[in-house]
Image: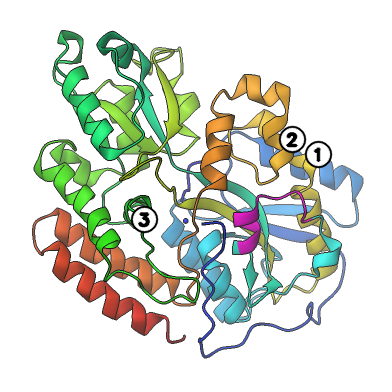
Amino acid sequence: MKRALALGIAALVVTGCGTSAPEGTGTNDGRGPITFATLKDGTGTVPKLVEAWNAEHPDQTVRIIDLPEGADGQRQQLIQQAQTKSDTYDVITIDLPWNAEFAARRWVTELPREQFDVDGFFAAPLKGSEYRGKLYSIPHFTGAGMLYYRTDLLGRAGVAPPKTWAELKAACAKVLALPEAAGMSCYAGQYDKYEGLTVNFAEAVGSAGGQVTDDEGKPKLDTPAAKAGLDFLVSGFRDGTVPPDAITYKEEEGRRAFQQGKVLFHRNWAYVHALMNATDGSSAVPGKFAVTVIPGASGPGVSTLGGNNLAVSAFSKKQATAREFIKYMTSVDTQRTHAKGSAYPMTRTAIYQDPELRAKYPYLQVLQDAIVGARPRPALVRYGDASSAIQEQVYAVLGGKTTPEQALSTLQRQLAEFAQGA
């Protein structure tokens, strides 16, 4: 999954915000042709699924509208449509952490839980689809960060995949001493100033035993665990564990670095597996890597939950059809077909037990374990402001422009303000 991409089992629901959630299931409960505003699918799988729906529903056809590539552009376009109360979009794709904001702003409609088969979803994505105990979106894709590592080089050095940060650095010391590893760096994630930095920071804090916010949305960055998590990122740049140019890495830059044999360990999403395992000459590492859960301070780490949800625009005039289409797109049968056509991580647990899919995607068990243990990003109504603040402060620390202590103090104050309301 490319957006992941692009963040425990319980969502961090804010209870003190100043706006209320939509009530009921909307007043425009009609049927007919609808639009589906979603991420562009390079595999062609989503268009085929829509074609299958259209063949069965000639009076309720679906037209796909591609959203911008970047998450920021997607959010901006959806907000513009909502603020003008446009009925151009019927079903919309939203990042999981946007659920609280869109529900609180009355931009999406509450979904009647009894109309959806919710028992088969992973617990964390489903919980993140709620706002104040009510359901406002349905998990479509999910995901969790995994640690990619070079099996060939670790094998030659007699090193096991690391479970802790200390083991990761010790493994690098041994492996990078090999002649075959000359010129390589140890580890890289996503550290450019964008949503991926928020994800990596939240993972570092969680993997040190902390939380960015608690279950009530209150910030918890004035803790030793938060300091330990940020120190892990900072020390990686200072001691050479992380290459200097990783300060510009998003998902694709890091993927290319690992794929070209420049880094030994790499944190990324599931979608990069097929790209790095390509045998057409585009990758230098096919058959030479595997995945495991990300490491933590004292044991396996905690990934930040990724994924996208499907919701019904509050301004749609055909909400009955919109709900039916969401049920179709998130059903077990459709998800199984979708998974066979693309590597997007599905949200129903049954998909991860399918023998055919397990053979096709050897990382499925690791991914399932990572999703089960993952934590969502803070479900704040002002999530966009919170993420921007985290990016600004953490990037400044990694660039040596401020101290971890000062950055965490500033974030503690800023996130407390964002948690107060809209």
Query: Against 34, is 15 above or below?
Result: below
- Residue 119 covered by magenta stretch: yes
First in sequence: mark 1 or mark 3?
Answer: 3
Mark 1 and mark 2 residues within 8 Å of each other at the beta carbon:
yes
Query: Against 149, is 6 above or below?
Result: below
Q: Residue under label 3, please give it.
A: 209
Q: Position of residue 364 (x, y in %)?
A: 58, 31
Distance between mark 2 and mark 3 Cα atoms: 35 Å
Mark 1 and mark 3 residues within 8 Å of each other at the beta carbon:
no
The local secondary structure at tag 3 comes to loop
- Say if residue 169 shows up in the picture: yes
Q: Residue furthest bottom?
A: 18
Q: Position of residue 100 (x, y in %)?
A: 56, 73
271 vs 144, nearest the viewer: 144
Say whether residue 48 is left or right of residue 115.
left
The amino acid at mark 1 is: Asp
First in sequence: mark 2 or mark 3?
Answer: 3
**Residue at 57% of width from left, 46% of height from top?**
372
Numbered range of the magenta stretch: 118-127
Residue 336 image label: 2
* Category of crowding for the residue at label 2, using alpha-carbon neighbours closer than 10 angstroms: few (below 14), some (14–19), many (at least 20): some
3 vs 41, nearest the viewer: 3
The local secondary structure at tag 1 comes to helix
